[in-house]
Structure formats: structure tokens, C-alpha cells
Image (cartoon, rainbow, N blue to C red):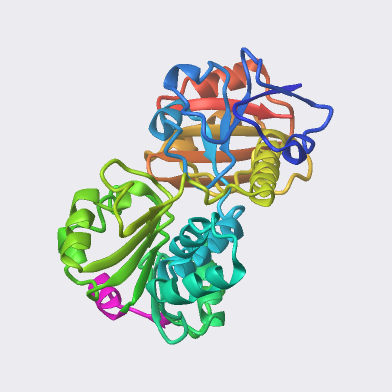
């Protein structure tokens, strides 16, 4: 029986994925896995027998990933599960940044005391020019980050008649297939900024992207352009942005992350982190997170981990052992030597690494006994050994 502890309200369709071999609730004292959304996970919540943490969402800034890696705990996320939800909000932001819909609605509401229809129509016609905007067709959208969300935004913008340019130095081959051929590839960010009437950010929060939008990069923006941030708040330097809004380098800022000092700025529209706040996105994330946890616990395979390599090895026969170790030379040789000493045949073996972590799946011809498991654990650099049943 696998105990899974949940935090936050996980969509029921995701919880329903767990079968009879799972005991899932928020009240577990010694879980094998954690499933969460926005809960800020603390290191002291990483129990002694914890194997995995799954975050039902793309970002993992609420998970102590480094501490998990040190303990051999696999951290999963669900990239792409909320991509359509974020895409739709970005398109909404594009439209709201171009047309003063909010101002128009507020004006009409201010006329609630006007009972005469003719007078109402006269007031509306006299004042509507104050809310004149511009169309998106023919404008250029610069997409920074062409992953699951950025590629969808690019396609939607093309459908709206926009010209789209993109920049993503870390674009994978798989992701490249999703990017529409009509998207112009820019060689660097200054070139993209200078060409774009609108810039939308879709990069993860990393050391390399924190403060990406700063005094220097903002100087490359086309004067009066619009910046959209539905990625992560720290990617934009708030002080530098405030200065760019004041001098007209940036005409409007629309983001999903309220920050002090910008909330009541007349050129800023902020939403309360609504990117993934749809029923469909929450369900998609919960289902993906649950599936990845079960696949890992039952087979040892790893999909969409932020700290471990992608690993998939079909189960055929034999007895599977999963070994996590520091990524240093000679580890695999020591493991296979122990097996050879005990005359245990290896049916199949997969070894992959990522940064400082190496992960091994080993299918053995006979069941490992406690002596073998203890011997494997005693190898210097081995973090954990698990029999996958």
C-alpha cells in the first residue's frame, strides 16, 4: 500500500486515478509521495521514507528541490497541462492592453442614474472617443520562450493576424515541432524587443532568467510597446519597469503577479495569479501529476522530473531495483561487481544522470535479499536503494 499525502484542494478527477493500492489523504504521517499545488513545502515536511513530490503545475518554486535532490527524492511537475489556460489569459491580456474595455465598462456603470434612454445614448456617443484603442492585426508580437505555452500563444496571435517573432535559445527538438513555421526566429533578445509592439514572457524562473527584464534590456524595447508577464514575477525587475513606464519606453504592463508599487499605476493591469485557474487546467494538472507518481512508484520510470533524468524501461520479467547515487565515476561498476560476486544475472539495466544525480534501474534474475540491498546501500555515494514491486 502506497501512502500519498495531499496538500491544497486537488481536483477529484486526479485523485480518482489512484487505485486500490493507494491510500491518499491530507492526513498521512509517513507518506511515500506528496501531491500538492501551491503549498509552500518545507524541508521538515520531507519524511524519512519519502520517495517523490508531484506538483500539479509547471513551476516548482514552492518545493525545496535542492533538498529533495540531496535526499534522493524525485520532484515532478506537469508541464503543458495548464498551457491552454495560460494561453487564453495571455490573449485576453493582449486585447485588454489594446482596447480600454475596463474604462468603457466603468464609464457606463457611472451612468446608472440616467433614466432617459435618449440622454444615455447622447452621453455614450459624446464620451466613447475617450476609450478608443487599436487593433492587433498587423502588429508584431515577440514571444520570449517557445515551449508549451509560448508556442500556443504564438499560434493564437497568428490567427489574430499578428506578425510573430520568437526567441528561445534552449528550445528542444520536441518543442520546435510545436512552433508554427510562420514564427520568425530572432537571434537575440534586443533584436526581438526592438521589433515588437507587444512582448510576452514564457520562460521558467531560473538564475539566468531572474531579472531578465531590467534597465538594460528595457532600453531595447520599442517606445510605447506593451509587456506581458504570465511566466513568473521575478523575471521582471519592478523598479526598472516602473521607470520605463514613466519615461514611455513601455506603454503598458499586464501581468499575473501583483507587486507593491505597481498595483494602482495607470499603465498597469495586474491579475491575482489566474494563469492556471480554470477547472480544466486544474483537472489536467491533477491527472498528469497522479499518473506520473503512480508510474514512478510502480515501475521506477521517471517522466517530467525537474531534478532527475527522464527514465523509461519496460518491465518484462525479473525483480527490479532502483538505485540513486551521486553522479561520480565508477558507481555502476561497483554495483555490477556486487551482483557478479553473488552470481546474480542482470536481465536489463538502464543508467542515466542529470547534473549531480545518477539513477539506475536494474532488473535481476532473482529476488534481491537484504544482504545485497545493504551492500548496495553501503557503497559510498549511493543515496538510496529501492525494490520496485
Residue 262 in sight in this render: yes
Magenta highlight on residue 178: no
> In the depicted view, which residue is nearer to us: 190 or 263?
263
Q: Is residue 340 left or right of residue 72?
A: right
Whether residue 147 is visible? no
Residue 104, image x, y percentages: 47, 65
Residue depicted at 19% across the width and 50% down the height: 239
Judged left or right of residue 266, residue 288 is right
Question: Magenta includes 189?
Answer: yes
**Which quadrant would residue 52 be assigned to in this image?**
top right
Is 315 positioned to the left or the right of 351 in the image? right
Q: Position of residue 63 (x, y in %)?
A: 46, 33
Q: Residue at x 43, y 21 (%)?
A: 43
Q: Position of residue 194 (x, y in %)?
A: 25, 77
- Magenta highlight range: 184-195
| 388 vs 244, nearest the viewer | 244
Amino acid at each position: 500500500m502506497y501512502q500519498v499525502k495531499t496538500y491544497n484542494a486537488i481536483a477529484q478527477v486526479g485523485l480518482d486515478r489512484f487505485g486500490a493500492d493507494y491510500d491518499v489523504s491530507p492526513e498521512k504521517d509517513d507518506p511515500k509521495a506528496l501531491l500538492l499545488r501551491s503549498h509552500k513545502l518545507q524541508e521538515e515536511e520531507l519524511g524519512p521514507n519519502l520517495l517523490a513530490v508531484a506538483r500539479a503545475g509547471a513551476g516548482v518554486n514552492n518545493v525545496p528541490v535542492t533538498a529533495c535532490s540531496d535526499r534522493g527524492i524525485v520532484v515532478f511537475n506537469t508541464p503543458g497541462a495548464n498551457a491552454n489556460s495560460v494561453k487564453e489569459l495571455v490573449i485576453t491580456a493582449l486585447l485588454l492592453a489594446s482596447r480600454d474595455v475596463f474604462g468603457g465598462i466603468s464609464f457606463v456603470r457611472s451612468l446608472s442614474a440616467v433614466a432617459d434612454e435618449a440622454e444615455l445614448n447622447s452621453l455614450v456617443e459624446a464620451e466613447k472617443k475617450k476609450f478608443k484603442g487599436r487593433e492587433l492585426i498587423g502588429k508584431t508580437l515577440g514571444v520570449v520562450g517557445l515551449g508549451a505555452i509560448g508556442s500556443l500563444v504564438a499560434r493564437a496571435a497568428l490567427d489574430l493576424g499578428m506578425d510573430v517573432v520568437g526567441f528561445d535559445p534552449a528550445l528542444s527538438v520536441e518543442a520546435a515541432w510545436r512552433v508554427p513555421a510562420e514564427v520568425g526566429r530572432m537571434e537575440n533578445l534586443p533584436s526581438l524587443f526592438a521589433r515588437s509592439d507587444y512582448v510576452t514572457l514564457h520562460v521558467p524562473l531560473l538564475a539566468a532568467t531572474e531579472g531578465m527584464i531590467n534597465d538594460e534590456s528595457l532600453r531595447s524595447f520599442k517606445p510605447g510597446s506593451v509587456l506581458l508577464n504570465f511566466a513568473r514575477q521575478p523575471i521582471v525587475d519592478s523598479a526598472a519597469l516602473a521607470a520605463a513606464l514613466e519615461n514611455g519606453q513601455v506603454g503598458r504592463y499586464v501581468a499575473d503577479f501583483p507587486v507593491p508599487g505597481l498595483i494602482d499605476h495607470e499603465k498597469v493591469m495586474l491579475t491575482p495569479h489566474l494563469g492556471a485557474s480554470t477547472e480544466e487546467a486544474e483537472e489536467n494538472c491533477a491527472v498528469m501529476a497522479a499518473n506520473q507518481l503512480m508510474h514512478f512508484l510502480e515501475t521506477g520510470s521517471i517522466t517530467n522530473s525537474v531534478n532527475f533524468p527522464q527514465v523509461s524501461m519496460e518491465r518484462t520479467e525479473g525483480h527490479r531495483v532502483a538505485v540513486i547515487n551521486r553522479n561520480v565515476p565508477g558507481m555502476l561498476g561497483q554495483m555490477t561487481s556486487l551482483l557478479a560476486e553473488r552470481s546474480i544475472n542482470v536481465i536489463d539495466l538502464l543508467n542515466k544522470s542529470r547534473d549531480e544525480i545518477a539513477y539506475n534501474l536494474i532488473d535481476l534474475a532473482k529476488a534481491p535479499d537484504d544482504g545485497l540491498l545493504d551492500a548496495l546501500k553501503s557503497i559510498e555515494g549511493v543515496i538510496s536503494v529501492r525494490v520496485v514491486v
